[in-house]
Image: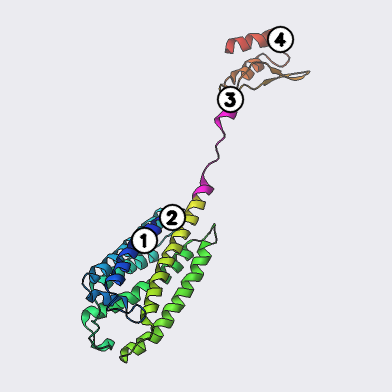
Amino acid sequence: MSENIRLVTAFSALALVPMITAHVIGAATVNPLIDPISWYAFVPGGGLMIIAGGSLLALLGLLLMVRMYRTGVATGPVPAVAMIIFSISLVLVGVCPTDPPTAGASISDGTLAATIHRICAGSAFATLPVIGLSLARTIDRPVSRMPRMLCRSAYGLAGLVALFLSIHLPLAFAGSGIAAFGFIERAGFVIMIGYLFLLAATIDRESGARTAAVQPIEAPASVLPAGPVEVPVLVSRRAGDYPLAGASVAEPSIRRHTSSHGVGASPSLVSASVESTT
């Protein structure tokens, strides 16, 4: 399991603990198929569970943002700004509770806290496709299939968010709502975590493959000679070139000494020159 996948796995598991706890302590009053998750804020201890779960996912988003820039996968301000909005929205969703179940169902009759809660909930889901698309487009030379998968998933998620809002908002302003709103909201929470897994996998694949591509290839120490490499040095003569045995690369003055005696110098002069250089 890669580094960022482990990170998302750990934080997602931690975030699910308070969310499951909220479902347990509020099982008697909140219907998970119909009622929104935010209604657990009105169950004793439920509000803290919502804040804890949202804050853990917000921290996870910021950590992924830092890693995508540190590894060079992301460039430019768009992925960072979108991820910061995502993280802030998740925190404010828990800090600002929605209207209690006894209040009116119309959005226009809601409190300021409920309005902030709804805007931040929509912003958290709306910024996820922006993060994916901006990240995929900054990877100009992909080394894996992950950027393409991320781009397709971002378009798919954007379509789902647009479809949900186009149905939910008119009903909410009219004082009604989607019948299975609770189920859809919880399914969206799972989709959010899955999308974070996809972001982590993209960072891991792209950064890992790029690092491997630029690493130099080193020869094993066992195949390298222990001492200096000696090569034969050719001495030009009329009859042809022949090597001087025992001459090394570190003795370039041999050719100069032999050439100073002229072409066709006797072997004794060549030998004397070699001895003088050593």
Q: Is 137 placed left or right of 241 in the picture? A: left
Asked whether disc 1 touches disc 4, contact meaning CB atoms under 8 Å apart, the reply is no
**In the rendered image, the vertical position of residue 241 relative to residue 95, given as above or below:** above
Residue carrying label 2:
72
Mark 3 or 1: in front is: 1
Residue carrying label 3:
225
Point 26% across, 67% down: residue: 49
Q: Quadrant of residue 102?
A: bottom left
Camera-nearest residue between 74 and 267? 74
Q: Position of residue 95 (x, y in %)?
A: 23, 71
Q: CA distance from mark 3 to mark 2?
A: 39 Å
Q: Which residues are magenta?
A: 211-223
Q: CA distance from mark 3 to mark 1?
A: 54 Å
Amino acid type, callout 1: Ala
Residue carrying label 1:
13
Q: Residue furthest front?
A: 28
